[in-house]
Amino acid sequence: MYCVKCGKEIGDNSEFCPYCGAENPDAKKQKDQAADYYKQMYERENRPENYHHPQTKSEGMVIPLLALIFGLLGGWLGLVFGIIGLAKYKEKSNKIMCIVGIAAWAIWLVIYTYMRNFG
Ligand SMILES: [Zn+2]
């Protein structure tokens, strides 16, 4: 390409003319476009929805719900499903359900042990 100011031939990627120092608007535009492209790529890769796996709500809730139900009913299944749920699900709401399930199981275990030893 040629310099817009002095008309001498300059490299396609030269941002400034080496002869007169004029800015080369085409090279600058290309550079900006490249920067925009990388910025877009970066933003696309770092979008939060790419972090957790796409799961439908009902599917994602099954194991945490089981943990909660079994935990509240009392039994080892509450712990089992709680641990599976914690390992498997990233969503905060599901993790809370698993933790509540495990907590309910722990309370059940304390009561159960107490009843067996002292009841
Ligand atoms: Zn020039």
Image (tube, rainbow, N blue to C red):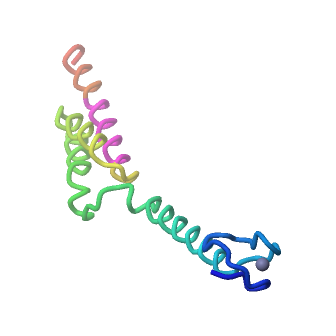
**x then y, percent, for residue 91:** 37, 53
Viewport quadrant of the N terminus: bottom right
Residue 102 occupies which quadrant of the picture? top left
Q: Judge left or right: residue 82 versus residue 18.
A: left
Relative vertical location of residue 85 with respect to residue 10 in this rendering, above or below: above
Residue 11 occupies which quadrant of the picture? bottom right
Relative vertical location of residue 92 with respect to residue 16 in this rendering, above or below: above
Residue at 20% across, 48% down:
66
**x then y, percent, for residue 106:** 30, 30
Front residue of 77 and 63: 63
Magenta residue span:
95-108
Front residue of 58 and 45: 45
**x then y, percent, for residue 3:** 72, 81
In the image, is residue 96 part of the stretch drawn in magenta?
yes
Q: Judge left or right: residue 102 versus residue 36.
A: left
Front residue of 15 and 64: 15
Residue 56 occupies which quadrant of the picture? bottom left
Q: Quadrant of ligand 1?
A: bottom right
Q: Residue furthest front?
A: 8
Viewport quadrant of the C terminus: top left
Secondary structure mostly taken by the magenta-highlighted segment of the chain: helix
Residue at 38% across, 47% down:
96
Relative vertical location of residue 38 with respect to residue 72 in this rendering, above or below: below
In the image, is residue 52 part of the stretch drawn in magenta?
no
**x then y, percent, for residue 110:** 29, 24
Relative vertical location of residue 29 with respect to residue 65 in this rendering, above or below: below
